[in-house]
Image: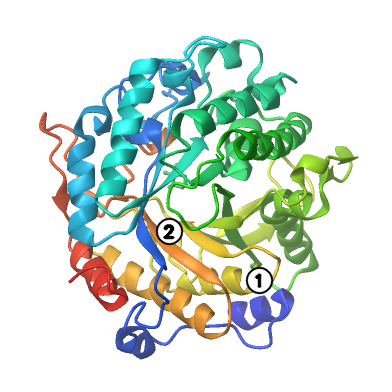
Amino acid sequence: MVLPALALVAGCAKPITFDAGAIAANRMLAGAPPGFLLGAATSAYQIEGGNHNDWSEWEKGRYPDGTPHVLDGTSATRAADSWNFWRADLSALQLLGANVYRLGIEWSRLEPTEGAWDQAAAARYRQMFAALRAAGITPIVTLYHFTLPTWVAARGGWDWDGAPAALAAFAGRAGSAFGDLVDWWCTINEPNVLVAKGYLAGQWPPGARDPHRAAMALAALMRAHGLMTGALRENDRTDADGDGRATRIGIAQNLRIFDPYSASPVDGIVAGAADDFYNQAFLDAVTLGRVRVVLPGVIDIDQPFPPLAGSLDYLGVNYYTRDLVVGHLGGPNIYTPASAPDRPRNDLGWEIYPEGLYRMLLRYAHRGWPLLVTENGVADGRGVLRSDFLRAHLYAVDRARAEGVEVIGYLYWSLIDNFEWSHGYRGHFGLYAIDFEDPTLTRRPTAAVATFQEAARNLGTLH
Ligand code: IFM
């Protein structure tokens, strides 16, 4: 009874279920146009090692009950050491047949104190971008992926009203320093996740559980994105790839399906509210050119903010899973996620639901932005789920494209195993596995590399 009820409340006549035979028969990306972006993604802090910021401080801390902020008390001190092993990452991309790589630059490394600029670090990033381009791999550079320099955190992080301007100044500097090598920029990674984890769940810095602060932080991130776009457009005037455009700017928005668990109105209302705050608020702000965050009974922010209007050249879609929502109208949590019967789960317990990617691509089609899947992946330490996961999610992309959705690329998360925030080294998302106990940190291809290569051959980026 649960699933039909679910479909009814979700407003679809029939639940969408992919057919295993159709997925197996699909020639992944065979119909994608030339120029389709196929590659993988990482973030600076999760792979580089050697960074000092609000997260490295958070890692040292514990909750009041004594448990460490990061499972097993691990840290990203060395991570995958990509600061030194970046050439191994480049080889891994080449073996895949990737034509694009989304990677981050670390704000705290480049601007360790306010207004400073680390020339040696900038030179290393330039070396990486130049090597990628020489290998025919387009860099997509993320400017802010969850970590703040300690000087920003000391002023209050996203509670500091100077934070949006400070991040925009960094974006402008990055635009001038790297713009001759980089056209594709991602301003902010998953503002909604940052707010949910850092300001509602208390699991990431600054460790708050405060809906009012959460809404204010989301509003600050909206302002930051608008200002960053302006700064990038002003400071990066060089068309690095000769396609007539000096910048392509997007955000990477985590999109999660919130389906009501049952036909109970409470599940439906709460699923809708979660969807509004998590999936929709940031994108509405961009569409309307207004900083707008509404949490009924908590806060109602609605102010014009012209820099947001027209600030997206593409929408980055980070898609992983769905939550089946059992809603609560009182108590500390507005919902508890229920288990979907008979669906596989990844190592972190997330439902594997490729139909959700298809649903999201359809939902965000025709909003004025081409869609780029900037992250999609599975935590799978045993390497038994990833190939099928990739095949099924590329089927979702192909099917959406066949129905007229402008999907311009797909990036698997992650290129290599990395530091998975509060899960430490327990979330093995990599197409290449790393044994973090092994001093060589060798990148070892998982079985999914062959599946990725199959897609790359169909696309024509691997011969
Ligand atoms: O590792 C994260 C990444 O930093 C942001 N998107 C989701 C990934 C998997 O949890």
Residue 320 spot, x, y in % from top left: 47, 58
When asked about the image quadrant of residue 181, the answer is top left
Residue 149 horizontal/vertical position (percent): 51, 18
- Tell me if I can see residue 438 in this picture: yes
Note whether 104 is above or below 452 in the view shown: above
Question: Is 239 situated left or right of 289 in this image?
Answer: left
The front one of 256 and 271 is 256
Mark 1: which secondary structure?
helix
Q: Specify the label residue 264 is tagged with.
A: none
Disc 1 target residue: 363
Identify the residue at image location x=61%, y=26%: 167
Amino acid type, residue under disc 1 in the picture? Arg
- Write down the residue under mark 2: 376
Instruction: Examine the rendering and report whether any part of residue 382 can be seen.
Output: no
The quarter holding residue 15 reads bottom right
**Is 457 left or right of 275, judged from the image as shown?**
left
For numbered disc 2, what is the local secondary structure?
loop
The three-letter amino acid code for the residue at tag 2 is: Asn
- Residue at the image point whose x is 31% and y is 89% from the top: 25
In the figure, 65 relative to 271: above or below?
A: above
Percent x, y for residue 88? 17, 41
> Between marks 1 and 2, how big is the CA–CA gap?
17 Å
Q: Nearer the viewer, residue 258 or 265?
A: 258
Residue at 38%, 39% (x, y): give it.
420
Q: How many marks?
A: 2
Image quadrant of ligand 1 equals top left
Q: Tell me if residue 355 comes above or below residue 181 in the rendering.
A: below
Question: Is disc 1 surrounded by few (<14), some (14 to 19) or many (20+) residues within 10 Å?
Answer: few
Question: In the picture, residue 271 is in which quadrant?
Answer: bottom right
- Queried on whether the Cβ of the residue with tag 2 lies below 8 angstroms from ligand 1, the answer reads no
CB atoms of marks 1 and 2 within 8 Å: no
Image quadrant for the C terminus?
Answer: bottom left
